[in-house]
Image (spheres, helix red, strand yellow):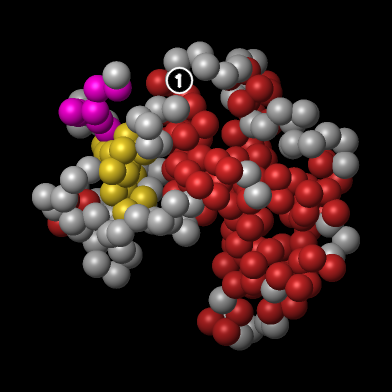
Amino acid sequence: MLEVDVLPVLYSFRRCPYAIRARYVIDLLGVPVYLREVTLKSKPAALLSLGGRSSVPQLIDVDGARYPESLDIIFWALSKADGCISLDALWPFQIIKQNKVKAWIKYNDRFFKYWLDRYKYADLHPEFSGVYYRRRGEAFLQRLDKRLKKSAFIFGESVSVADIAVFPFVRQFAAVDQAWFELSEYHNVKVWLANFLNSERFKSVVMVKNTAWEAGQEEILFPAC
């Protein structure tokens, strides 16, 4: 039986793409944590008391080690994996392949996220139209679609950290104008994204709704046994 008296604590926000990718990897690897859902407008004192940045996701390990970024959490989870799945496909052993995965994540986090934010909140960036911002972001979708024409996932026929790190942001991009996205030319991206969004893992585990955590309440085990 799983011992859950003392587990790492994951502060998370359900809709945050960074938190989604962290939760997805944690669930995929079956690494147990206590999940504390955070309300961004009213962050819990336990999170604020950590000092420094109070954004989510953040993970506090049982030894007090703090992992303040989603990628930190993903690599932490990889280090805790018990061998239940092939890690080489998810996170390759070869440094040159790791660097290729990192390059895709960096392209997403720096380039695509920049234009996604402006497309999503075009009214806050009136210098250009929403269509302009969308077209700039489409450069990423074009490259991704071309990549996915060759295989089901970015690096072959098995999901990798690159796919998991990227898809929550493509999900947000698609949601800005769902009708446009469904009619767009990015067929391979649409199939790839649907593979994640329609999965039981995503719908029933990663995106399960929880009430905002408050001090003293019973901890929520994630992934649930």
Residue 49 makes an appearance in the image: no
Q: Could you tell me which secondary element the residue under label 1 belongs to?
A: loop
Quadrant of the rendered structure where residue 163 is?
Answer: top right
Quadrant of the rendered structure where residue 157 is?
Answer: top right
Amino acid type indicated by mark 1: Ala
Apparent side of residue 208 relative to residue 67 in the rendered image (left or right): right
The residue segment tinted magenta is: 2-8
Q: Magenta includes 3?
A: yes
Apparent side of residue 40 relative to residue 82 in the rendered image (left or right): left
* Position in image of residue 204 (x %, y %): 50, 47
Residue 205 makes an appearance in the image: yes
As displayed, is residue 127 above or below residue 206? Answer: below
Residue for point 82% across, 41% down: 147
Apparent side of residue 149 relative to residue 78 in the rendered image (left or right): right
Badge 1 is on which residue? 81
In which quadrant of the rendered image does the N terminus lie?
A: top left
Q: Residue furthest left?
A: 216
Residue for point 71% across, 70% down: 178
In which quadrant of the rendered image does the C terminus lie?
A: top left
Quadrant of the rendered structure where residue 82 is?
Answer: top left
Q: Magenta includes 201?
A: no
Out of 113 and 170, give the one closest to the viewer.
170
Residue for point 22% across, 43% down: 219
* Position in image of residue 212 (x %, y %): 28, 59
* Position in image of residue 111 (x %, y %): 64, 55
